[in-house]
Image (spheres, rainbow, N blue to C red):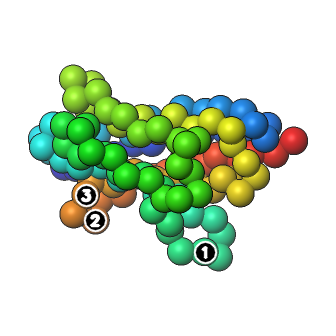
Amino acid sequence: QVQLVESGGGLVQPGGSLRLSCSASGFTFSNAGIEWYRQTPGKEREFVASISSAGRFTSYTDSVKGRFTISRDNAKNTVYLEMSSLEPEDTAVYYCKRTGYNNWGQGTQVTVSS
């Protein structure tokens, strides 16, 4: 059974940092690309970042380039999203998913507010 569990969200002030984690099970993690998405009420889910199976290739949406870093630890079956210089516009529920599959975690809430 495929499971993806996001964690690490919370309330942070503008300019602050957070690290999100996506822990996976039920499939061969080291063979899977992983993607992060985010969603705010009333809007479609938006792509944020992705990382290839071995971590060699990464991709980011323009609005987070230079502020967010995606990485992975295949020994721990975990992908991370390091977020810095956070802005109120980054407020959303953040989800991870396996590339090419429609398996989603429950999401983790990130709120950027003073």
- The numbered dot on residue 99 is 3
Give the answer, above or below, for where 46 lies relative to 78: below
Residue type at mark 1 is Lys
Q: Is residue 7 visible?
A: no
**Crowd class of label 1 (few under 14; some 14 to 19; many from 20; radius 10 Å):** few
To which residue does mark 2 refer?
Answer: 102
Q: Residue at x 75, y 37 (%)?
A: 15
- The numbered dot on residue 103 is none
Residue type at mark 3 is Thr
Residue type at mark 2 is Asn
Q: Is residue 44 visible?
A: yes
At which x and y percent is residue 43?
60, 74
Give the answer, above or below, for where 9 lies relative to 102: above
To which residue does mark 1 refer?
Answer: 43
At which x and y percent is residue 113?
81, 45
Distance between the alpha carbons at the discs numbered 1 and 3 = 21 Å
Q: Nearer the viewer, mark 2 or mark 1?
A: 1
Distance between the alpha carbons at the discs numbered 2 and 1 = 19 Å
Task: Left or right? Give the position of 64 relative to 56.
Answer: right
Q: Give the quadrant of the C terminus.
A: top right
**Crowd class of label 3 (few under 14; some 14 to 19; many from 20; radius 10 Å):** some
Is there CB contact under 8 Å for labels 2 and 3?
Answer: no
